[in-house]
Image (cartoon, rainbow, N blue to C red):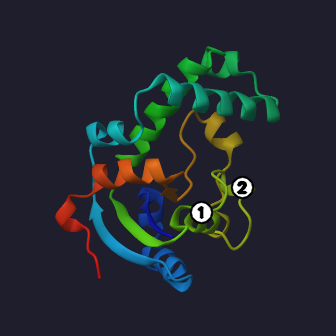
Amino acid sequence: MTEFTVVIIKPDGIKKGIVGQVIERFERVGLKMIASKLIWVDKTHVGKHYQDKDAYHQTVGEKTLENYQKYGIDAKENLGTTDPLEIGRMVRNWNMEFLSSGPVFAMVWEGPQAVLIVRKLVGNTFPSDALPGTIRGDYSLDSAYESNMEKRTTRNIIHASGNREEAEFEKKLWFKKEEIYKY
């Protein structure tokens, strides 16, 4: 079954000059690029990508708290709260600051199980936990520990849709219908 997914090379990936190498990895497995563009988005646009919803904040906050516990960091001392919703909102703001800090390269990829294949190629959200051979494992050293201690987003090179529903939403957010090609 053919599906599509959205991939965004973030400002840290653009600065490293790895766009071509990332594209090559997706093409090598047989995925087809059906849309792409270099764009510098503002916080309003990024705020639509990282939606201001309690469910999102709760999930992100809980994951952040898990990392704080894993590394023995006192969340209350470092962030001023242990409320997952508040922490999720903080992380959303960090994400918005980062994604709007420079140009990004947005793409839509098509192929059988595109979401799953791209997620495998991209690797773990935290580059320090990503396996060698994945994009994050090969191109970034950042960790949850460093980003949490510095109160910023993790610089992990790339975004990839997490599921088909997310891909559908992101495709409409990042691309106009006429920017997506069938061939």
Position of residue 64 relative to residue 18, above or below, is above
Question: At which x and y percent is residue 119?
Answer: 59, 61
Residue type highlighted by circle 1: Leu
Name the element at disc 2: helix
Name the element at disc 1: helix
Within 10 Å of disc 2 (Cα), the crowding (few <14, some 14-19, many 20+) is: some
Which of the numbered marks, if any, corresponds to residue 180? none
The C terminus sits in image quarter: bottom left
Report whether residue 160 is seen. yes
Which of the numbered marks, if any, corresponds to residue 128? 2
Q: Quadrant of residue 147?
A: top right
Residue at the extreme front of the image, as rendered: 1
- 151 sits to left or right of 16: right
Q: Quadrant of residue 44?
A: top left
Question: At which x and y percent is residue 9?
Answer: 44, 62
Report whether residue 139 is seen. no
Residue under numbered circle 1: 116
Q: CA distance from mark 2 to mark 1?
A: 21 Å
